[in-house]
Amino acid sequence: MRMPAKVYNELAASSELPPAGVILDPGNAEQYQTGDWRSERPVWNAEACIHCLRCWVYCPEGAVRVENGRVTGIDYDHCKGCGICAHECPPKTQAIVMTRETGRSA
Amino acid sequence: MAVKMTRMTLTGNQAVALAMKQINPDVVAAYPITPQTEVVQTFSEYVANGEVVTEFVTAESEHSAMSAAIGAAAAGARAMTATSSQGLALMWEMLYIASSYRLPIVMPVVNRALSGPINIHCDHSDAMGARDAGWIQLYSENPQEAYDNLIQAVRIAEDRRVLLPVMVCQDGFITSHGLENLEVLDDAVVREFLGEYRAAITLLDKDRPITMGPLALQDYYFEFKVQQAEAMRRAPEVIEEVGQAFGQLSSRQYGFFETYQLEDAEAAIVALGSTAGTARVAVDRLRRDGLKVGLLKLRVFRPFPATRLVEVLTGKAVVAVLDRAESLSGMGGPVFTEFRSAFYDLSSRPLFVNYIYGLGGRDIGLDEFHRVGSDLRKILAEGKPRQIISYLGARL
Ligand code: SF4
Ligand code: SF4
């Protein structure tokens, strides 16, 4: 038994849901796109970044994307716009700046 | 075909404890409270004697007892507890957790008045207060019914169409401490009737890890409540099936209610629990005096069997509903308001009157029924009641 995919980002009907609010998929947080209520958006500047990974360490949502030890961008599906990454980015570098959120798309 | 049964003389509490022994639940978590104490005390002797495999948890309160039963049921165990009055009130928030988690916990409730003033005797204010907690409620007239209802409750609760907890109520002291003869089934027969319990979902299935009791806010809470309501709407067919299966086994038939002299009656009296016994005698006396009166004893209060009640009571001129609880709504007792509402859509319906009686264990006898009878006679003659809600047996 699995959760219907619809549960995560659409609204499933009572008849489609497993009873009692039970969650049948372990480790499903990734499927739930929590980034849609952000009011500020971190903008990452690839040129300025020195890949110290402070943002990655401090981001409470695991929303800083890293490949092979290097930052590749922000996961806007899960970033909540808290600004911690921008705050932790070394002041001389300022490779992440917070801007006003205007729309959801990545 | 009916099976062999043993005749025994037991109190209502002992009968319930014996049924629990035969059910042999995986976990019982309980806290003693008058008048339920004898249930868990007797059951704990079965545990001590090794007559059951049950893990018996002596909790420090009823809130903890229900919490432990919920934890056990969530882990996949057949779990039970038992309580009365303040104990039920202390369980309050956990009652809703049990039903919303859809855990088929079965709980004998030995009805007792709620404080204050503090009182240990029977009325239905405890269970009636919990009527909207999402539990099925069965009411028992005597030790035999308390025993039979408890066994059926397990099968009703665990049915995959239902998965709701069930309270099995009996009247504190009146039946819980009254010795009566009853017929009990063999342990093996009860176990076969219930079958081995396999939880629909369990926290302890390591191959299918799940989360129970997560947060559901504006976007999902409502849908889960609709699911509970639908399970409650599916419960009647299961209650009926289980009642019939139990009837085949024991020759004792169970439905949503029982009637006595009702068919040709002009006036009907509705009662729950032990009062039905007195009411039967009263009906005979009143009939001897020329009043065409009958009795409807309600067994299932949740889900409320409205359609079936309408079927048997339509055509009666007047229905007197007896309530052993005052819901303090200014609108009469809880059973009365449900009955009136059930008949609202009919163009022609009986008149309804309500008698609130027996609070705090105040006895109800033939004198009280005599008063109901003379009121009913007046209503039949005058075509309408002078008073809709009355206190029967209180000094005004
Ligand atoms: S704004 Fe907050 S959530 Fe978004 S990437 Fe930065 S630290 Fe993570
Ligand atoms: S903290 Fe700033 S500099 Fe360091 S990896 Fe993140 S964006 Fe790049």
Image (tube, rainbow, N blue to C red):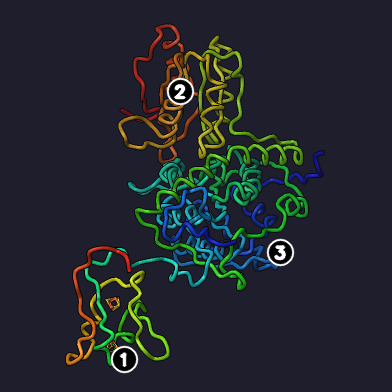
Q: Which of the chains bears the disc numbered 3?
A: B
The answer to whether the residue bearing label 1 lies less than 8 angstroms from the nearest atom of ligand 2 is: yes
The picture places residue B368, in percent across and down from the top left corner, at: 45, 25
Q: Residues within 10 Å of mark 1 (few under 14, many from 20)?
A: some
Residue drawn where x is 31% and y is 81% of the image: A59
Give the number of the mark in front: 3 or 2: 2
Q: Which residue is mark 2?
A: B343
Q: Which of the chains bears the disc numbered 1?
A: A
Residue found at the far left of this picture: A92
Q: Amino acid at mark 1?
A: His
Q: Quadrant of residue B56?
A: bottom right
Residue drawn where x is 56% and y is 27% of the image: B308
The residue lying toward the viewer, choosing from B298 and B357, is: B298
Q: Quadrant of residue A88?
A: bottom left
Q: Residues within 10 Å of mark 3 (few under 14, many from 20)?
A: some
Total count of labels: 3
Residue B232 shows in this picture? yes
Image height of B30 relative to B115, above or below = below
Quick check: B220 left or right of A58?
A: right
Residue B82 shows in this picture? no
Q: Which of the chains bears the disc numbered 2?
A: B
Q: Which residue is mark 1?
A: A51
Whether callout 3 and callout 1 share a subunit is answered no
Image height of A56 relative to B327, above or below = below
Q: Which residue is mark 3?
A: B51
Q: Amino acid at mark 2?
A: Phe
Image height of B356 relative to B291, above or below = below
Residue drawn where x is 71% and y is 58% of the image: B196
Q: Earlier in the sequence, mark 3 or mark 2?
A: 3
Q: Separation of disc 3 and disc 2 at Cα?
A: 49 Å
